[in-house]
Amino acid sequence: MDNNRIGEVQRKTSETEVLLQVELDGTGNHQIDTEIPFLNHMLTLFSFHSLCNLRVTARGDVEVDDHHSVEDIAICLGQALKMALGDKRGITRYGEATVPMDESLARVVLDLSGRSYLVYNVPMEREMIGNFATENVREFFQAVAANAGINIHIDLLRGSNTHHIIEAVFKAFARALKDAIEIEPRMEGIWSSKRVL
């Protein structure tokens, strides 16, 4: 196992500039500045509940829309996770978490299989939280799944407050990922009958 499971990605386009670093074996330390306060809040929760150290600096055309920044940050997070996981030797691979936030209850199940797929069933009524469009929650996880090679199933079991719903989803994703990236000491190789992920 690589004792230094860190991924760092820099992405610069005509619309955004993102620098992101993730350390899997961290303590939840974070430095996050995305120009989107609600996304800062969600990424902080992700870091805290996954115990991954996370540094994100992002600048984008948020005066036009938040979509470009949200998607590009998620692309970088997915790529950084993939880089940090390396050959995935010894990882538990699967993770599942069901997390409440007041009246809301969200479940995330994931597989670090190398095959990206997102199933997303999270209805929300509110369209905006500050300068964050809630439709971009799906775009965020779609980009993470595609760039990290993760199969992610996200289901809202119940909930009415949009802030609570999204918070429960991010916390559940973080907790599920925390379990999936853990090293199983009895597994010397890759936890797949194919011996590759």
Image (tube, rainbow, N blue to C red):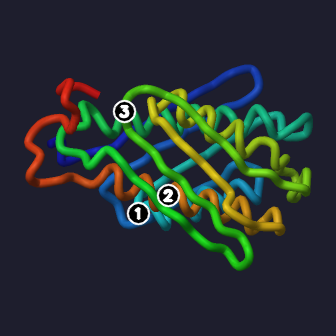
Q: What's the residue at 17%, 53% (across, down)?
A: 184
- Mark 3 Cα within 10 Å, few/some/many (few <14, many 20+)? some
First-in-chain label (1 vs 2): 1
Q: Is residue 173 shown above or below 20?
A: below
Q: What's the residue at 12%, 46% (across, down)?
A: 187
Q: Which residue is mark 3?
A: 113
Query: Amino acid type of disc 2?
Result: Ala
Instruction: Give the left or right position of residue 153, taking residue 26 as reference.
Output: right
Task: Estimate the x, y position of residue 35 in percent, counting from the top left.
Answer: 76, 50
Tell me if I can see residue 58 in this picture.
yes
Q: Which residue is mark 2?
A: 174
Q: What's the residue at 50%, 35% (across, down)?
A: 78
Task: Estimate the x, y position of residue 196 in percent, counting from the top left.
Answer: 23, 25
Residue at the front extreme? 157
Foreground mark, 1 or 3? Answer: 3
User: Is label 2 in a helix, a strand or a loop?
Assistant: helix
Location of the C terminus by quadrant is: top left
- Identify the disc placed on residue 51: 1
Answer with the quarter of the image where residue 114 lies.
top left
User: Do tag 1 and tag 2 residues touch (Cβ < 8 Å)?
Assistant: no
